[in-house]
Image: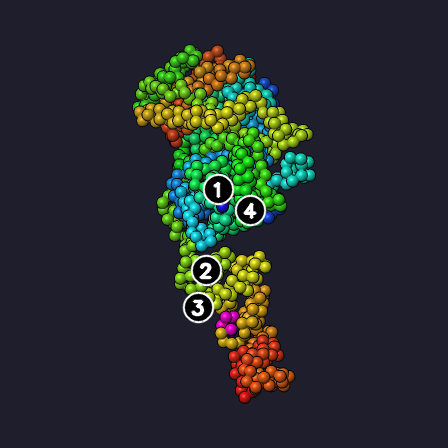
Amino acid sequence: MSKYESVIGLEIHAQLLTESKIFCSCSTTFGNEPNRNICPVCTGQPGVLPVLNKKVVEFAIKTALALHCQIAPYSIFARKQYFYPDLPKDFQISQYELPLATNGYVEINVNGNTRCIRIHRIHLEEDAGKLVHAGSDRIQGSTYSLVDFNRTGVPLMEIVSEPDMATPEEARAYVQEIAALLKSLGVCDAKMEEGSLRCDGNVSIRPVGDKNLGTKTEVKNVNSTKALKDALDAEIVRQIKAVDAGERIIQETRHFNENTGQTISLRSKEEAHDYRYFPEPDLVPLEVSKEWIDEIKQGIGELPAEKIKRYVEQFGIKTEDVETILESPGMAEFFEGAIRLYGKPQIVANWLTGEISAYLNAKKLEIKNSKLKISTLVGMLALIDKGTISGKIAKEVIVKMLDTGKSAEEIVKESGATQISDEGELIKAIQEVIKNNPKPVQDYKDGKKASITFLVGQVMKVTKGRAKPDLVNKLLEKELS
Amino acid sequence: MNELLIKPSHELHELLNKKEVSSSELTKLFFERVESVENKVKAFVTLTKEEAIKKAKAVDEKISKGEKIGPLEGIPIGLKDNLCTRGIKTTCSSKILANYLPPYNATVIEKIIAAGAVPVGKTNLDEFAMGSSTENSGFFTTKNPWNLETVPGGSSGGSAACVAASEAVLSLGSDTGGSIRQPASFCGVVGLKPTYGRVSRFGLIAFASSLDQIGPLTKDVTDAAILMNIIAGYDPKDSTSANVAVPDYTKALTGDIKSLKIGVVSDLMGKGIDNAVKDAIKAAIKKLEELGAVIEEVSMPSFEYALPCYYIIAPAEASSNLARYDAVKFGHRTPDPQDLLSMYYNSRREGFGPEVKRRIMIGTYVLSAGYYDAYYLKAMQVRTLIKQDFEKAFAKYDVLVSPTSPSVAFKAGEKTGDPLSMYLSDIATIPVNMAGIPAISLPCGFSNGLPIGLQIMGKVFDEEAILKTAYAYEQATEWNKQRPNL
Ligand SMILES: [Zn+2]
């Protein structure tokens, strides 16, 4: 066992899913051609002024409530000043003193244990633009650089945890929990690979049992929860080695290289920034009334943790199925809608987490954007119950439903995939199987009753799965007796 | 000189309505005037003759059709060159913005366009409105029409001089520490700084965001009220603009100030104020008393800290507001920069003048880690004290009066080598911006042929009281009828 323990705190930057930017009315649509979503305000033209987007505040309050934070009735914006070409005003409007929310917590599950991670603060700020460099991958050494301001002014919410995580695994679980929460609140799509959720880790080590915190380093450039865990693991190993070798840890920012699995020093001390924060004089203090908070509270509905509990208790379905359902945007609503029409929660859950999720994941779709409707899914389940199609056929039918948006009945009719309920037709098939399989037939007649399973399988094959197995079994027994 | 050139807008409006003169004739007349005196006065950075002619024609068509025209329709106006005008050069009199074409109009410009005023051009200022003489303009110095050896004041020197020299009927300026009132005083015109938040700042190129305010410079108090009617009001594009009802300011011009309580700020009537100025102010106070006002002296002890605090807060905000001139998106870029830093350093070194650099450095310093509390935070606390001093005084008085400037216009070059003495010329105007209250300056006498200005300060959002007082005084005196002989 190591004689050191690690202490981890995380800063999460979440891009909020508002339609317009935080201080102007430009669209936040991702992936447009460069410098399409821009205006005088978000390009920092002389004379422009910011106007705070109310929706952004609402999303942050929603999150703050879900994370049990205290929401400040009075908070202020500040200018964080530094020169960089992706920052049109050469300062970022952020919050420094008096942030929007403080003192919250979230519960995470790691290896069956529940841990409470405290939230230090939540604040709002604007995103910067994007640089494209010619001749190098950074500004140093490039022949020229281009700047795209589409992302400039996209609202960011920063969630800062307390240093409450003891292991990289906990850090990973924390990010997953926050991501699920943001998604279920509909405030952020939380895609780390696309940068809509970004995460920096602050990590230090100390001798086991020591109460004082060691010098921390900040680990950047992780774009998945796995990378976060790997980066923290690597950084902890580096720190332990350094301390054991008698070196001192210096407070610095370190860059994680996914290829080497190592962290490297990003900024030397002399480049340490003095951001010269001061209150943003172009914005008035943000006042949040109790009434507004109550109104937002009403609109939040159930949080993921509450929902998991309810689904397990009320519907008796498996926790892992609930988690899969909640991970996919809109699927919980779909699930509940289907249950209202059809009942049988576990059967609905099986279909949603099985074939349907597989299809959606492969096509990178959300269920609400797919062609499947609650009514058509329920229609298909009813066909199975009536015996019109087998479960096996249904797995093909559902893919066609997702592809075309047609009902199961239409698809079955078109493909002739209905089950054979005409006994005469079935008996014909059975007689054919008996004729072609004399050995198993003899075995059965000699008392090896188990060989009937083989014969049923053969009948199913001949009927291309359109027969009902129990009916086949019954009719076979009759024919063989 | 054609007598139309010296008339205020409300008189010209009558003549336009009676078809005694057309807007096109008026416009032609003013541009002829510009041609004959502009080489001496140098009030304009850019002239907008084509726009003006087009606009005047449109107004004349309206009149000929018998349509009603608004009070400023067809009236030539000068616009300070820190107000963004779409597609028309807006330079802030800085080399760094020498060729900047804004993609949008300031809210006040939209309002001026909607009001149908005829734009003569963009007026010269101290670079980024930092200065008290227009000598800090990155292009050239504007001259005081009363004496071309002296400065017109600043930073709205061009806006004051163009009205005094009859190159425009009226103009818009901006006031951060006295930049409307002090040049109005130096040039013998009326200048009003509205309450902070009364006029939208959207499109006013920021110097110090918490102090800047746009306001009128005019030939008389009535014109100031008329222009205020057009530019005042809440703007959703400016979060700091106030959602407060805007009265009809011309209604305040009753001429009746009986029993009005006036406080004379004793701290601005002592040391550092020229005797000639003091005498003129005392005479003005006597006149106000004769008109029925009740006069008392009031002391504002926090005023002595206003100037030093201003020179912390204003540069702090300026250092941040001017960061965006980084040669990335617009403005001057040094030829052939070697790398990013040399682009930043050289472009800003070449683009900004010495006073702007001085203030950026001061502002950067006072916001730096370890100095913030001692300077910026402390200055903000003193600012609160200044506000409280005003609140106390306004519990007792309807308006306060003082000189606008400690002296009349000084000689060009006299103070350029001594920034502190230059800064002192705003000692009476700065407390007003620190408190966010409105104040007006109007002519109240002469010394050596140079105008003296009386400053009248009012409660927050009570521009009516200062307009009322100023109007009563103006009606009882002849100072504003004086015109420089160019
Ligand atoms: Zn924009």
Asked whether the residues under the numbered discs 1 and 3 touch, taking CB atoms below 8 Å apart as contact, a structural biologist would say: no
Label at residue A3: 1
Dots 2 and 4 on the same chain: yes
Asked whether the residues under the numbered discs 2 and 3 touch, taking CB atoms below 8 Å apart as contact, a structural biologist would say: no
Asked which secondary structure carries label 3, the reply is loop
Q: Nearer the viewer, residue B327 or A229?
A: A229
Calculate the distance from the C-alpha at mark 4 to the C-alpha at mark 1.
Answer: 21 Å
**Which color scheme is applied?**
rainbow
The residue that mark 2 highlights is: A319
- Asked if the stretch drawn in magenta spans residue A160, the answer is no
Q: Looking at the image, is B173 positioned above or below residue A372?
A: above
Calculate the distance from the C-alpha at mark 1 to the C-alpha at mark 2.
Answer: 36 Å
The answer to whether residue B134 is seen in the rendering is: yes
Q: Looking at the image, is B150 positioned above or below residue A33?
A: above
Label at residue A230: 4
Calculate the distance from the C-alpha at mark 3 to the C-alpha at mark 4.
Answer: 43 Å
Label at residue A22: none
Q: Start and end of the magenta stretch? A: A380-384
Dots 2 and 3 on the same chain: yes
Circle 3 crowding by C-alpha within 10 Å: few under 14, some 14–19, many from 20? some
Residue type at mark 2: give it: Thr
Circle 2 crowding by C-alpha within 10 Å: few under 14, some 14–19, many from 20? some
Dots 4 and 1 on the same chain: yes
In which chain is the residue bearing label 3? A
Residue type at mark 1: give it: Lys
The residue that mark 3 highlights is: A343
Q: Nearer the viewer, residue B160 or A209?
A: A209
Residue type at mark 4: give it: Asp
* Sooner in the amino-acid sequence: mark 4 or mark 1: 1
Q: Residue at x 46, y 20 (%)?
A: B426
Calculate the distance from the C-alpha at mark 2 to the C-alpha at mark 4.
Answer: 27 Å
